């Protein structure tokens, strides 16, 4: 999952970038509204964390423009304490959720998880695919109730697929959603990670659609 973090405070940016990275997200950072505008329009994000008080272009204007362009990405706004009118302006501009500064990083992470889940149409924090379960809160994966040990890269890949069950996902899309902008991308690495992941899961679960990509097949639940 890839996140755009728009924040002009250098200390807070560093802290959030590191916390989001530790939580398994690929993070791009924009320190002002202009850069945010550009990145939001050119890169595919799974969620955006948008501070409203920004240099160059303010957060509400950035968000209004994105929504006018029909960008549906979930957006969590960061507002200053006591600035209730900022919240109203943010929601009117198309925000999905908000946090008032200062906040606990844990709460930000929980809200981001929920936003991404809901954007995928998933109600529960525990994602299931037949005997396979992924807990988005703890980052634990189980197969028939037994823990499956995954590397960070394997987990990111599986998490993306489990947020898009039964969907054809191309290697390009996976590359774009698993790596930040400054990462040296190579779609062959995706193939390698899929192959490793497959060895740890039931054989038919990740299907290769020749020349197109992959699909996580969710078995029909027993009647
Ligand atoms: Ca600010």
Image (spheres, rainbow, N blue to C red):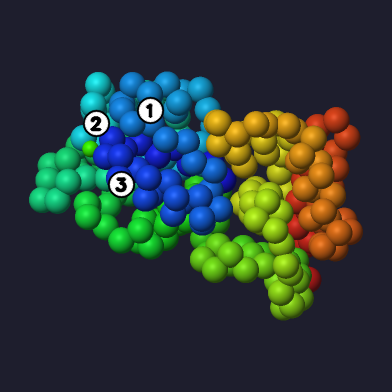
Q: How far apart are marks 2 and 1 (CA)?
A: 10 Å
Give me the residue at 21% from left, 35% from top.
53
In the image, residue 181 lies at what x, y percent? 55, 31
Q: Residue at x 35, y 36 (%)?
A: 6
Image quarter where the N terminus lies is top right
Query: Residue 113, how many percent across, how many down?
Result: 47, 56
- Are the residues flagged by discs 3 and 2 in contact, CB closer than 8 Å? no
Determine if residue 64 is in view.
no
User: Mark 3 and mark 1: span between their CA atoms?
Assistant: 16 Å
Secondary structure category for the residue under label 3: helix
CA neighbours of label 3 inside 10 A, class few (<14), some (14 to 19), many (20+): few
The answer to which of marks 3 and 2 sits earlier in the sequence is 3
Q: In which quarter of the image is ligand 1?
A: top left
- Of labels 3 and 1, the one closer to you: 3
Q: Nearer the viewer, mark 3 or mark 2?
A: 3
Residue with the mark numbered 2 = 54
Tell me which residue sits at (21%, 45%) in the image.
79
The answer to whether residue 65 is above or below residue 133 is above
Left-right relation of 87 to 27: left
Asked if residue 24 shows in the view, the reply is yes
- The residue that label 3 is drawn on is 12
Which disc, if any, is residue 36? 1
Q: Quadrant of the C terminus?
A: bottom right
Q: Is mark 2 within 8 Å of ligand 1?
A: yes
């Amino acid at each position: 999952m890839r996140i755009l973090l728009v924040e002009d405070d250098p200390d807070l940016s560093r802290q959030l970038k590191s916390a989001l990275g530790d939580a398994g997200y690929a993070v791009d950072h924009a320190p002002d509204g202009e850069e945010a505008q550009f990145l939001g329009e050119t890169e595919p994000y799974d969620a955006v964390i948008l501070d409203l008080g920004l240099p160059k272009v303010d957060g509400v204007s950035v968000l209004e423009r994105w929504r006018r362009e029909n960008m549906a990405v979930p957006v969590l706004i960061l507002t200053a304490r006591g600035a209730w009118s900022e919240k109203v302006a943010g929601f009117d501009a198309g925000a999905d959720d908000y946090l008032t500064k200062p906040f606990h990083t844990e709460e930000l992470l929980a809200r981001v998880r929920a936003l991404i889940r809901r954007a995928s149409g998933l109600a529960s924090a525990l994602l299931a695919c037949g005997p396979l379960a992924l807990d988005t809160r703890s980052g634990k994966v189980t197969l028939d109730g037994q823990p499956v040990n995954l590397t960070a890269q394997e987990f990111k890949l599986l998490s993306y697929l489990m947020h898009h069950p039964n969907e054809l996902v191309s290697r390009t899309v996976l590359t774009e959603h698993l790596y930040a902008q400054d990462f040296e991308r190579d779609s062959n690495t995706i193939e390698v990670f899929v192959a490793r992941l497959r060895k740890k899961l039931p054989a038919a679960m990740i299907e290769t659609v020749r020349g197109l990509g992959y699909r996580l097949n969710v078995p029909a639940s027993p009647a």
